[in-house]
Image (spheres, helix red, strand yellow):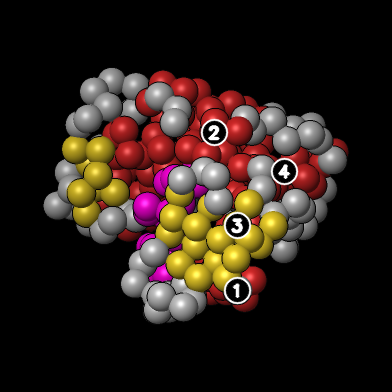
Amino acid sequence: MLTHQERVDTAKSAIDYICGRSPEEQSQPVPNCPGWTVYNAASHVGRVAIAWKAMIEATPDDPESRNRGYAVADTVPEGTDAAALGVFAHQALNCLVDDPDAEAFFSMTGGHGTRRLWAVHAAAELGIHRLDVEAALGHDHAMSDDAAVDALSYSFEYFLPAMAKAAGEVPGSVTLDALGLSLDVGAAADDNVSLRGRPVDLLLALWGRPYDGVEVVSGEATVLEAWRSVPERAFQFGTWD
């Protein structure tokens, strides 16, 4: 697993990559996120980071911090420069550097979290969006196996259970063969799948992105396909711009 500082650095690197594309690149569509261009991805990164900052700075018993943060994000003018959007994102991550174990409101649990947990979330989500933009621009994926395993662990413990709760469904249990990770949020024992593949490919598959090289070792492939559609049905951001 990554250290706290490695997670912060991974997230910051993703911000710089996404928000630092040329004007020509910013106009390119992002097939992984239908309806988005690369600029829309940068806008998403900058605006959600404004909401993250509000939650990071709030106590766990302040659920309205999320709404306050998005209200501020909605005041960002359409067409704001991608570099400026990157500054917003860095401001949120800068809040994570000191006192990682300080308590904070964490949206994936609906309450208690820490700055350390926010760094895990930021590295995973921004890492995914970097993968999206890299695929859109034909760039090689920069995510390391360690970062992908870290994001998979976070996905199993927090992200996918939260999406299943929001969608009101539990597709089944998932085991990642050889990685020692399993996802079981109360599904029937016979609804399961065991998967094998490179960590980045497994991450793409479970976040509903196009993927290659994932093998179904045992169980039902339909369980994987059901999980892939849960995040989209649970909650999706618009383009803003």
Give the prevailing secondary structure in the magenta stretch. Answer: helix
Question: Do the CB atoms of the residues marked 2 and 1 lie less than 8 Å apart?
Answer: no
**Element type where label 3 sits in the image:** strand
Q: Which residue is mark 1?
A: 220
Q: Is residue 134 above or below residue 236?
A: above
Distance between the alpha carbons at the discs numbered 2 and 1: 27 Å
Kindly report the distance in space between the C-alpha atoms of the residues bearing marks 3 and 4. Answer: 25 Å
SS label for mark 1? loop
Residue 147 tag number = 2
Question: Which mark is first along the chain, 1 or 4?
Answer: 4
Q: Is residue 162 in the magenta section?
A: yes
Q: Residues within 10 Å of mark 1 (few under 14, many from 20)?
A: some
Task: Identify which amino acid the numbered label 1 is placed on.
Answer: Glu
Q: Residue at x 39, y 64 (%)?
A: 184
Q: Amino acid at mark 3?
A: Leu
The percent position of residue 106, horizontal first and vertical second, equals 29, 49
Q: Is residue 158 left or right of residue 235?
A: left
Rendered image quadrant of residue 153: top left
How far is disc 4 from disc 2 in space, using C-alphas? 17 Å
* Residue 195 numbered mark, or none: 3
In this picture, residue 199 sits left or right of residue 99 = right
Q: Amino acid at mark 2?
A: Ala
Q: Position of residue 127 (x, y in %)?
A: 58, 39
